[in-house]
Every structure is written in structure tokens, then in C-alpha cells.
Amino acid sequence: MNGMQRRRRRSAGLSADGIVRCAREIPLAMAERGETGTVVAVGGNPGMRRYMTGLGFTPGSELSVIDRTPGDVIVRIRGSRIALDAAMAADMLIRTV
């Protein structure tokens, strides 16, 4: 495979091993266990946004979903494990790959 073919495959969302990987933006509340992503936006009221920003949920921060329980999401972000309730997770938009 030449360089042009590799560039076309990457721009089409194909990895080097031929697996299709599509970035998608979803609320954190919809992310599955083991999924990783990047924070795109933090919603909610101004006080909640300040609180979440203080915990490290800023646009561009990488996170991974460690576990899910009915109504809660446990994530790892910036070296910390943080549990969020469903309302807080629903107000956060992430980009997954």
C-alpha cells in the first residue's frame, strides 16, 4: 500500500488494520463501559459547569468510562476516578472513537 492509499484509508475512518473507526459525539450518560473519549462540552447551569470544570471536565480532556451502574457513570479523567449521577453525565458531551 502506498502513501496515497494510506491517507485515503485514514480519511475514510479506516485504521491501519482495516477496522472502521468513526468518531461520534454523544452524552456521557450514553457511553458504554470501557469506552474512551474527549470532552467536547459541559452543559448545565453555570454553577454546575464551574463545579465540573474544577473536577477536570474541560473541553479537550480525555476520559474513559470505568464502570456503569443504573443511574451512575464512573469515569477516569486526569488521573482521578469520579462518579457522576445520570443528570450530570447527561449534561456532558463527549467525542468517542
Image: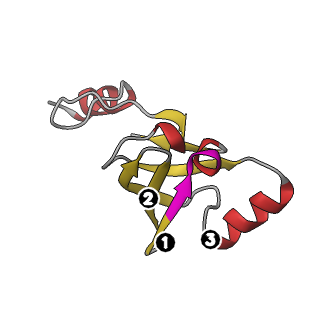
Mark 3 or 1, which is nearer the eye?
Answer: 3
Q: Secondary structure at mark 1?
A: loop
Q: Is residue 86 left or right of residue 42?
A: left
- Boundaries of the magenta span: 83-87
Q: Is residue 39 magenta?
A: no
**Distance from Cα at disc 1 to Cα at disc 2:** 13 Å
Disc number placed over residue 78 in the picture, else none:
1
x then y, percent, for residue 28: 53, 44
**Sequence-first disc among 3 and 1:** 3
Q: State the SS at label 3.
A: helix
Percent position of residue 96, x then y: 44, 41
Q: Which residue is drawn at the image coordinates 29% and 27% (left, top)?
A: 9
* Amino acid of disc 2: Ile
Amino acid beneath label 1 = Arg
| Labels 2 & 3 near each other (Cβ < 8 A) | no
Left or right of 79, for residue 2 = left
Real-space Cα separation, disc 3 to disc 1, in angstroms: 9 Å
Q: Is residue 2 above or below residue 36?
A: above
Q: Classify residue 59 as left or right of residue 7.
A: right
Mark 2: secondary structure? strand
Tell me where residue 69 appears, x and y as whole percent: 40, 49
Which numbered marker is on residue 55? 3
User: Which residue position is annotated with label 2?
Assistant: 74
Instruction: Name the residue nearer the viewer: 80 or 17.
Output: 80
Q: Residue furthest front?
A: 70
